[in-house]
Image (spheres, rainbow, N blue to C red):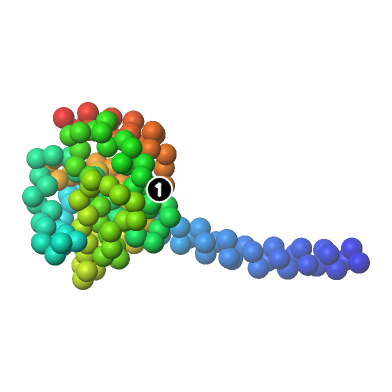
Amino acid sequence: MARNYSLAIVLVAILAVPALFLLFAHRLAVGAAGLKPGESLPALELVGLDGRPVDSRSWSGAPTLLVLFRSTCGACEREIEGLTQIAPSLPEMRIILLSLDSAAPRVSTGFQVLCDPSGRVVRKLRKMMVPTLYLVNEKGTIVYVRTGLREPESELAVFAGLLEQSR
């Protein structure tokens, strides 16, 4: 009986190692994708939910936080709620939500919501995981990139520090 358990443990270990390797390799590859701090935000031609075109070049002159989200993503919803809480503490920062599914967030915000119906912008950004945040300084240079959910209070300190450095 003990021998059967030993064999089962060995088989599970043999099968688990490749699966874990694939999982971590995928996470590393996804984390490495996308634009990096120090790179310029490419010109993006987006569409507002009202159908009006928006060009990202109009964002120069003020720091901009571009938030990629999906309307069906629970983590995105929590991220947007957190940003709504800290936004009054960062009045100089413009926050723009980029919907990857061309729908508004389920939570109410005062942020501009844009979409990318053709998928061209997402291909330019090379990022599919959500939520993803790009903090772009007033010159159009990416100074911070983050994928995944964080607590709003820790994010506030990060944004405030980065905005202070870029002045």
Q: Which residue does the image show at 51% across and 58% down from the upper left?
A: 24
* Residue 160, quarter of picture: top left
Look at 36% across and 41% down and name the residue there. 82
Q: Specify the quadrant that holds the N terminus.
A: bottom right
Q: What kind of residue is marked 1?
A: Arg
User: Badge 1: few (under 14), some or many (20 or more) residues near its Cα, within 10 Å?
Assistant: some
| Residue farthest bottom in this picture | 118
- Residue holding disc 1: 78
User: Can residue 124 be seen?
Assistant: no
**Residue 44 percent location from the top left of the image:** 15, 59
Q: Residue 114: where, in percent of width, then height?
A: 20, 58
Residue 63: percent from left, percent from top: 17, 40
Tell me if 51 is positioned left or right of 78 in this view.
Answer: left
Image-based side of 123 in relation to 60, left or right: right
Quadrant of the image occupied by residue 93: top left
Q: Secondary structure at mark 1?
A: helix
